[in-house]
Image (spheres, rainbow, N blue to C red):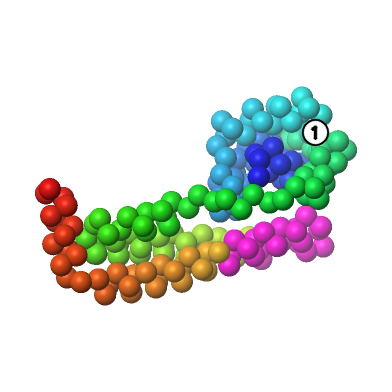
Amino acid sequence: MSLRMALITLIAGQPRSGYDISQEFDGVLKFVWHAKPTQVYPELRRLAADGLIREQDEGARGRRPYEITEEGLRALREWLTTTSADHSQRNETVLRSFALWLIKPEEARAFLREEMEYHRARLRGMRVLRKGLDLSRPADRASLLGLEAGIRRLEAMISWAEWAIDVVATWPADADAAADERESG
């Protein structure tokens, strides 16, 4: 998915300022797509220049929300109906799990506990967001689908971390000695 389509999707649901969008990327969208403000603002300007969104009048706190144009809606619908989803992912937690043999089992368990707690905190936040949806709004009905995917993914990561902690606890005692040897070697 391109940043362009992520921004248009957010703005299609309701007008949003660059600040509002950056907050979304740091919140609910973090499990799906990550974008920094330094990426968001230039892309918003490009989308406006391309006629896919337009700036509204200045709103609260001096923010200038963007709204989607008819051309933007056409582009979003075309993307939804004519392209396949990109299923590639980056997950540093899983990548690190492949390297946990390089550290002491207790260090590996500490890493896994930290990950489990991180996912539990995110899960609590996602559940709060889900409760706040107004299902009479079409955009919120669709948001329910994305939030539920996020909730289920977080639940799976928590279950995996619990399992992995138990597995690492069964690693042989000489794993500590091997980690010490790697550190000194």
Where is residue 150, by image quadrant? bottom right
Q: Position of residue 102 (x, y in %)?
A: 25, 55
Nearest the viewer among 38 and 131 is: 38
Left or right relative to 98: residue 46: right
Question: Does residue 14 appear in the picture of this structure?
Answer: no
Residue at 26% over, 75% down: 170
Q: Position of residue 137 (x, y in %)?
A: 81, 58
Compared to 131, does 63 lie above or below? above
Q: Is residue 136 magenta?
A: yes
Span highlighted in magenta in the image: 130-152
Tell whether 8 sits left or right of 153.
Answer: right
Q: Split into 4 quadrants, where in the image is the N terminus?
A: top right
Judge by depth and name the residue closer to the eye, 108 or 16: 108
Residue pictured at 59% horizontal, 32% vertical: 39
Q: Is residue 100 magenta?
A: no
Q: Residue at x 30, y 65 (%)?
A: 109
The secondary structure that dominates the magenta segment is: helix
Task: Write down the residue under mark 1.
Answer: 52
Residue at image position (64%, 61%) is 147
